[in-house]
Image (tube, grey):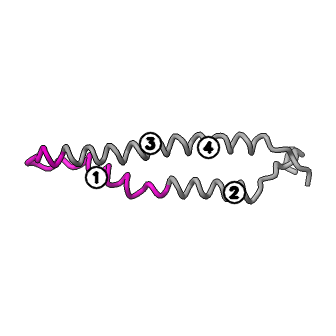
Amino acid sequence: MTENKQPIKSITKQDIDDLKNYLEQLASWTEPLKLVNDFFENQAIPLNKKKIMREFHAQAKVFNIFYLNFLLSMDTLEEKASNLEANKKRKM
């Protein structure tokens, strides 16, 4: 029971494992996103237009994949959070 005498919601091990998996999935994007950030921060002169165009298209594809994965993950996490909130309250 909480301080307000409210029952505590039960959270299963599976719920915790699912959350950890989604956090690991998002954390796996750290290095690719660092490369994208480095590309856009690079203001080196002289500019090699052909190299910049090739890198831009490659980085755009990496970002697009990340963005789609991020949106899917956010939808899934929001659904999981709603399910956790809706779980039956359990008296201890």
Q: Which residue is mark 4?
A: 76
Q: Which residue is mark 1?
A: 38
Gap between marks 3 and 1, in whole Å? 18 Å
Q: Residue at x 68, y 43 (%)?
A: 81
Residue type indicated by callout 2: Ile
Quadrant of the snapshot with the C terminus = bottom right
Residue type indicated by callout 1: Asp
Residue 56 spot, x, y in % from top left: 25, 44
Magenta stretch contains residue 34: yes
- The tag on residue 67 is 3
Gap between marks 1 and 2, in whole Å? 34 Å
Residue type indicated by callout 3: Tyr
Gap between marks 4 and 1, in whole Å? 30 Å
Relative depth, front residue between 51 and 37: 51
Q: Residue at x 44, y 54 (%)?
A: 29
Q: Which element carries disc 1, helix, strand or loop?
A: helix
Contact check, label 4 and label 3, Cβ < 8 Å: no
Q: Which residue is mark 2?
A: 16
Contact check, label 4 and label 1, Cβ < 8 Å: no
Which is nearer the N-term, disc 3 or disc 1?
Answer: 1
Relative depth, front residue between 9 and 65: 65
Q: Single out the mark in the foreground, 2 or 4.
A: 4
Which is nearer the N-term, disc 4 or disc 3?
Answer: 3
Residue range in magenta is 27-52
Q: Single out the mark in the foreground, 2 or 3.
A: 3
Residue extending farthest to the left is 46
Relative depth, front residue between 66 and 23: 66
Residue type indicated by callout 4: Thr
Q: Residue at x 56, y 42 (%)?
A: 74
The number of discs equals 4
Residue 61 spot, x, y in % from top left: 34, 45
Which is nearer the N-term, disc 1 or disc 2?
Answer: 2
